[in-house]
Image (cartoon, rainbow, N blue to C red):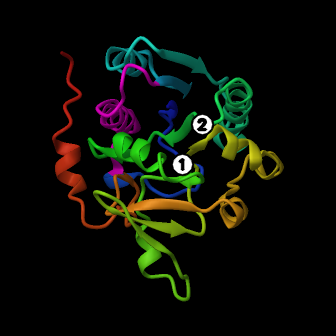
């Protein structure tokens, strides 16, 4: 698996939504990264695409990384310019063009807290599923009217379909390339509503990750406990 961790320490958000519990962004970046790192294997290739991140945080990420990790700095820019998305897609395309068709590429934003089994659950489902996957169980899917979904059972959890999502999801090389025109024509904005119509996306029930924004935590899981159990103090 190739993992693209997009991180930025700006407290402001592109959407204007407040940060979860007003926690400083540097702390969110470090805890969310460490939650992902717990599930990464040495054979995974990781890219840290960082935008205005302090050296202290970069050092923290490097300390909690395997050797197969590359740091890529995004030039400083106004958050609404979305240069970080353009640069991420530009780099992703270079990786897709040289990757095995079955290689899984996971783009993940820096405010997604993951359970310890999130990465392994995603790898397992990709042995049976050939479209998009996200580890986030969107809470609004349970309140939206007239939005049908399909539910499938796996060996250890259920998975449900989603009509759209945030810019945190994974797919195999061949799926990314089949959808590249949609992604490219939509950039830098979210392509999922159109993309998931032809290449469905599934997410686990309950979720293996949660977007850390007010009122948008994945249901059922005790995210406060998971957050509090992640130690980011210097070793």
Q: CA distance from mark 1 to mark 2?
A: 16 Å
Residue bearing mark 2: 102
Residue for point 45% across, 60% down: 203
Q: Secondary structure at mark 2?
A: loop
Q: In the picture, residue 117 is in which quadrant? A: top left
Q: Which mark is residue 169?
A: 1
Left or right: where does residue 102 sit relative to residue 225? right
Residue for point 50% across, 61% down: 202
Q: Which mark is residue 192?
A: none
Work out whether residue 51 can be spotted. no
Instruction: Give x and y (percent) for residue 200.
Output: 61, 62
As drawn, 108 above or below 217 = above
> Magenta segment: does it hold 232?
no
Instruction: Tell me which secondary structure the magenta stretch mostly adopts.
Output: helix
As drawn, 66 above or below 195 = above
Q: In the picture, residue 75 is in which quadrant? A: top right
Disc 1, disc 2: CB below 8 Å?
A: no
Which is more N-terminal, label 2 or label 1? 2
**Which sits in the foreground, 226 or 66?**
66
Which residue is most to the top?
Answer: 67
Which residue is most to the bottom?
Answer: 146
Q: Secondary structure at mark 1?
A: strand
Instruction: Give x and y (percent) for residue 123.
Output: 42, 41
**Which sits in the foreground, 78 or 142?**
142
Range of the magenta residues? 22-44
Residue for point 42% across, 56% down: 136
């Amino acid at each position: 698996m190739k993992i693209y961790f997009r991180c930025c320490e700006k407290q402001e958000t592109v959407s204007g939504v407040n940060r979860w519990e007003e926690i400083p962004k540097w702390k969110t970046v470090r805890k969310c990264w460490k939650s992902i790192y717990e599930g990464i294997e040495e054979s995974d290739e990781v890219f840290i695409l960082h935008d205005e991140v302090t050296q202290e945080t970069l050092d923290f990420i490097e300390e909690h990384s395997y050797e197969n990790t590359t740091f890529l700095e995004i030039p400083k820019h106004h958050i609404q310019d979305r240069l970080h998305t353009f640069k991420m897609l530009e780099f992703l395309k270079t990786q897709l063009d040289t990757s095995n068709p079955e290689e899984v590429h996971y783009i993940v934003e820096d405010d997604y807290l993951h359970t310890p089994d999130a990465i392994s659950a995603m790898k397992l489902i990709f042995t049976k599923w050939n479209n998009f996957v996200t580890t986030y169980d969107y809470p609004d899917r349970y309140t939206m009217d007239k939005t049908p979904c399909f539910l499938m059972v796996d060996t250890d959890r259920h998975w449900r379909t989603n009509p759209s999502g945030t810019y945190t999801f994974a797919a195999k090389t061949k799926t990314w390339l089949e959808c590249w025109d949609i992604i490219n024509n939509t950039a830098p904005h979210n392509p999922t509503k159109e993309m998931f119509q032809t290449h469905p996306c599934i997410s686990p029930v309950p979720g293996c990750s949660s977007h850390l924004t007010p009122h948008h935590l994945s249901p059922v899981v005790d995210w406060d406990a998971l957050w509090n159990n992640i130690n980011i103090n210097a070793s």
